[in-house]
Image: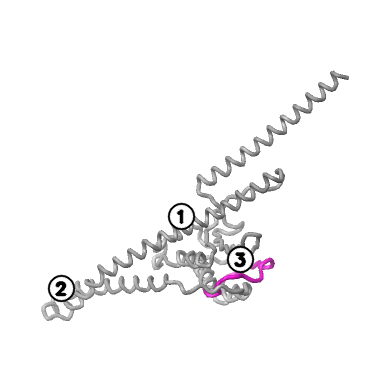
């Protein structure tokens, strides 16, 4: 009997060794994938939690949640940096433009300039400085967010208002799992309007809005089939004043992200658009 027992134990040890080796291999693969995701700044990366041991499942859930938290912290830090920079820039621009505007205005009314070749040039300088001053002032007012008023809002009503505004678009809406949101109604309306407006200007014909609620958050995914956003542009879409449109100001998306963060949420461009669409924005609350 002894040889059979030894053989059985040996076989059992081999099986256990193989199982442990495969288990360690899977863990190593998971660690490698998470490391690569962090290295590539893909903080929305997720790994499945099924088919792993209970303790490891909880750890993986924590890592998945941590990625989302890192993403929000990075976005918040970026927004705060841009806010500080734009405050400094607007202050310096106004300091430089105001005297130019005053001096040129004085010269325009001067007899020395009136009717001379200088008049046209000074008028152009005055008009340009005035336009720049007006733009900076409007941006300053626009970015001074109102007090956030968090309340229970009807998501269907919010989307219906959008559909009325952009009735020429074809809408695909799935709000079955999320009927209401705790958010600032005015801010949410402006955020969603900015996203849909950009989609329409990019030539979109179809808009898809899908809402999902998890234990941690509520997500709205807004997809469109307009002109895709190029990879090099995707990194800049939330940068203040960045725009690819000839008449754009580059304020809409950066302001929308500020509004979402003021409500404790976030606005991000998905790395991969929903199937059948070219661009997907993710609103998280």
Residue 67: x and y, percent? 56, 51
Specify whether 135 is left or right of 260: left
- Closer to the camera, 171 or 33? 33
Mark in the foreground, 2 or 1 = 1
Residue 254: x and y, percent? 45, 64
Q: Which label's residue is closer to the chain start, 3 or 2?
A: 2
CA gap between label 2 and label 1 equals: 44 Å
Residue receiving disc 1: 235
* Residue furthest to the right: 1
- Closer to the camera, 252 or 37? 37
In magenta, the rendered stretch is 169-186
**Figure disc tally:** 3
Relative height, residue 8 to residue 81 (above, below) = above
CA gap between label 3 and label 2 equals: 56 Å
> Answer yes or no: do the residues labelled 3 and 2 have beta carbons within 8 Å?
no
Instruction: Say which quadrant the C terminus sits in.
Output: bottom right
CA gap between label 3 and label 1 equals: 23 Å
Residue 185 highlighted magenta (yes or no): yes
Q: State the residue at coordinates (42%, 72%).
A: 144
Residue receiving disc 2: 118
Q: Which label's residue is closer to the chain start, 2 or 1?
A: 2
Instruction: Say which quadrant the N terminus sits in.
Output: top right
Mark 3 crowdedness (10 Å alpha carbons): few <14, some 14-19, many ≥20: some
Residue 98: x and y, percent? 25, 72
Residue 23: x and y, percent? 68, 36
Mark 2 crowdedness (10 Å alpha carbons): few <14, some 14-19, many ≥20: few
Mark 1 crowdedness (10 Å alpha carbons): few <14, some 14-19, many ≥20: few
For mark 2, give the secondary structure: helix
């Amino acid at each position: 009997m002894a040889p059979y027992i030894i053989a059985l134990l040996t076989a059992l040890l081999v099986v256990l060794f193989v199982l442990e080796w495969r288990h360690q291999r899977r863990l190593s693969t998971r660690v490698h994938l998470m490391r690569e995701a962090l290295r590539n700044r893909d903080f929305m990366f997720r790994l499945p939690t099924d088919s792993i041991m209970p303790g490891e499942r909880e750890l993986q859930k924590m890592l998945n949640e941590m990625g989302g938290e890192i993403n929000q912290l990075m976005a918040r830090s970026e927004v705060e940096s841009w806010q500080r920079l734009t405050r400094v820039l607007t202050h310096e621009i106004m300091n430089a433009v105001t005297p130019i505007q005053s001096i040129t205005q004085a010269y325009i009314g001067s007899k020395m300039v009136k009717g001379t070749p200088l008049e046209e040039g000074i008028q152009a300088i005055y008009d340009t400085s005035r336009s720049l001053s007006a733009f900076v002032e409007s941006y300053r007012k626009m970015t001074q967010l109102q007090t956030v008023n968090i309340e229970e809002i009807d998501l269907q009503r919010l989307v219906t208002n959008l559909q009325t505004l952009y009735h020429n678009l074809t809408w695909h809406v799935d709000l079955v799992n999320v009927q209401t949101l705790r958010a600032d109604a005015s801010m949410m309306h402006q955020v969603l309007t900015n996203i849909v407006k950009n989609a329409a200007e990019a030539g979109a014909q179809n808009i898809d809005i899908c809402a999902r609620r998890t234990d941690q958050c509520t997500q709205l995914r807004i997809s469109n089939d307009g002109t895709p956003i190029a990879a090099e542009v995707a990194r800049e879409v939330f940068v203040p004043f960045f725009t690819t449109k000839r008449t754009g100001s580059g304020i809409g998306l950066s302001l929308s992200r500020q509004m979402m963060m003021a409500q404790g949420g976030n606005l991000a461009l998905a790395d991969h658009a929903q199937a059948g669409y070219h661009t997907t924005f993710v609103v998280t609350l």
